[in-house]
Image: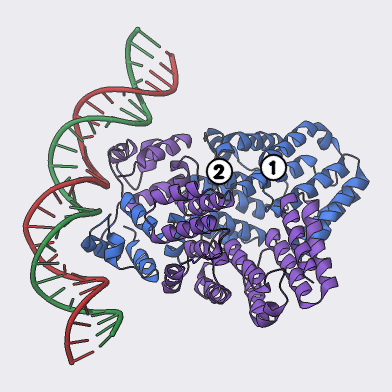
Chain colours: A purple, B blue, C green, D red
Amino acid sequence: MEQYGPTLRKIRKQKGLSMKELAKDSLSVSFLSKFERGESDISLTSMNQLLTRLNVSFDEFLFIHNDYSNQAIDLFFTRVHHAYLEQDTVKLEQLGANEKDQNHLILLELYVNILKNEDSNDLQLNLEPLYDYLFSVEVWGYYELKLYNSTMLLMNPEMVLNLSHTAFKKGKRYHSFRDYKNVMASIFLSTIIYLIGPVNKGDEMVTKYEADILKLFSYIEDLKLEEHETHLRIHVRYIKGIYMIKKGQVEEGTELVNHMISILRELQCENNAADFERYLGLILKGK
Amino acid sequence: MEQYGPTLRKIRKQKGLSMKELAKDSLSVSFLSKFERGESDISLTSMNQLLTRLNVSFDEFLFIHNDYSNQAIDLFFTRVHHAYLEQDTVKLEQLGANEKDQNHLILLELYVNILKNEDSNDLQLNLEPLYDYLFSVEVWGYYELKLYNSTMLLMNPEMVLNLSHTAFKKGKRYHSFRDYKNVMASIFLSTIIYLIGPVNKGDEMVTKYEADILKLFSYIEDLKLEEHETHLRIHVRYIKGIYMIKKGQVEEGTELVNHMISILRELQCENNAADFERYLGLILKGK
DNA sequence: AATAAAAATCTCATATAGTGGAATTTTTAA
DNA sequence: TTAAAAATTCCACTATATGAGATTTTTATT
């Protein structure tokens, strides 16, 4: 039994409510006392009533319960991402130690394999289980989007294309869920970058996948980005510029990209600006 | 008893899991069946185990359960805001009908009073209960921030100042919670606008509250905005420009503000740009 | 320090959440 | 059509969530 009670007590006290006031309409004081002391579990219905009365959402409650750290799902992907960037295979293996989820274990193994075989060319990744999972799920939730987003770079173009379309189709109903648009847009933009092809290669891929790239831009349109989602707006325009360059409109494309970079500079987003600039340089050198 | 079971079933099916697989390690199949058919409540601990296995957060679960609409807290404030903008007193009164929360009722009454007495000058608002509540709560959560944010414009300057400082002090631990920074920054920025004073008046307020305004800018610094939070970055610079104008640096201030407006235009944030421009016009006319 | 009021805990009775197994029905797949 | 898998139903049983009222602890006030 998880000890949710004490956390609830803490929150109740912070809001200056007595047990009587909180329990009103949903529970007896005596039971609330027992629960708050960690001596009993509570039903989902009762808990929901209590949290509603306290004006605290489940996620906020769990955020406090987990010592002011975020959701398990985000936490896992963030940790993996960091460990990978730091090439910390030990950390990755540690993360796997307490893990029961099959997908998570696969993902960790993939990353460890990549880090360990970085130089050798005979790297064979087994992505089948991931494909199977992502194709079998009927509606993609937040988790599936994150899972795909953090593994797409390991997949081959055909699969990426296929799954990005799938993401669009299977994720539709979530439009208004908090972080959804961000992950979705990020998936589509990464897909486009992927399809534009390696910077040092020719433009075969752009030509081959032209229809798909346009489709992906239309998916982003479909997200109907809000005016306050300026970061995504900047990112979209930037990728459009890159695409134009690859398509031959070198001058207009470069101008658009540089414009976005200058906006980022003005807002002191130095890292972002530098990343954008570096990639632009590579693209232009390939021309 | 809320019927959470059927929603869980729906999600389980979407993910292609059998009851046996889902129940493993946490529940018996026969009970899971009973729960999923809405014939029994479930303990918070069990539910958490099930959702963890499904890789679905509580908020995502409730989002689906509530027919793909968002959190109760946000929903309330959004609805009130819309009804107020549309001067729809009937809608506001409707919102109050099913409402049990004391603060919500106060807030609704305030808005109705404002709309009904718009022309007459003898409007007397009783904000005491709100002050009492906000001062009595030890740690401000998401709800308190939203509540304050949506009522601060009705309060007098001294109170706003006091409560904005309170927001900073009492909200500290939440830095990493999802929407937190947004609401927090929005509070500080609104406070600065408030302290800069009415556009048609002189600059007494800017002078009087100079130290406070600088303090508020430092609070925003303290939030350590991420590079991807470009919307807030734009907003902060815009307000800085307005402040410079009020302080006498008309030229530099106007330049900065116009710069931000032009960025918004480039990103096709037409409404935001227009709002910013309108306010700039008023400020400059007052000079 | 004394006292009253409010808040929280404890005791015990009861309702119901949850288990396990076996038989039955429904769904799925080949 | 048929066999296997998945889900439901029924039952007997245990664990525990919850409520009512008595008791103790805390808080506030003089």
Look at the image and tell me in which quarter the C terminus of chain A lies.
bottom right
In the image, B108: left or right of B255? left
Q: Are marks 1 and 2 in contact (CB under 8 Å)?
A: no
How many circles with numbers are drawn on the protein? 2
Label 1 Cα neighbours within 10 Å, binned few <14 / some 14-19 / many ≥20: many
* Residue A35 image offset from top left, x and y in percent: 31, 40
- Residue B144's mark? 2
Q: Is residue A92 visible?
A: yes
Name the foreground residue: A150 vs B170.
A150
In the image, A230: left or right of B133? right
* Residue B104 image offset from top left, x and y in percent: 53, 49
Residue at image point 58% right, 38% down = B171
Looking at marks 1 and 2 on the same chain, the residue that comes earlier in the sequence is marked by 2
Label 1 resides on the chain identified as B
Amino acid at the residue labelled 1: Phe
Amino acid at the residue labelled 2: Glu
| Mark 2 residue element | helix
* Residue A96 image offset from top left, x and y in percent: 42, 51
Residue at image point 58% right, 57% down = B78
Name the foreground residue: A98 vs B44.
A98
In the depicted structure, whether residue A108 falls above or below residue B213: below
Q: CA distance from mark 1 to mark 2?
A: 14 Å
Asked if marks 1 and 2 fall on the same chain, the answer is yes
| Mark 1 residue element | helix
In the image, A67: left or right of B172? left
Residue at image point 56% right, 41% down = B174
The residue that mark 1 highlights is B188
* Residue B83 image offset from top left, x and y in percent: 61, 60
In the image, D21: left or right of B190? left
Label 2 resides on the chain identified as B
In the depicted structure, whether residue A49 falls above or below residue A11: below
Quarter of the figure with residue A115 = bottom right
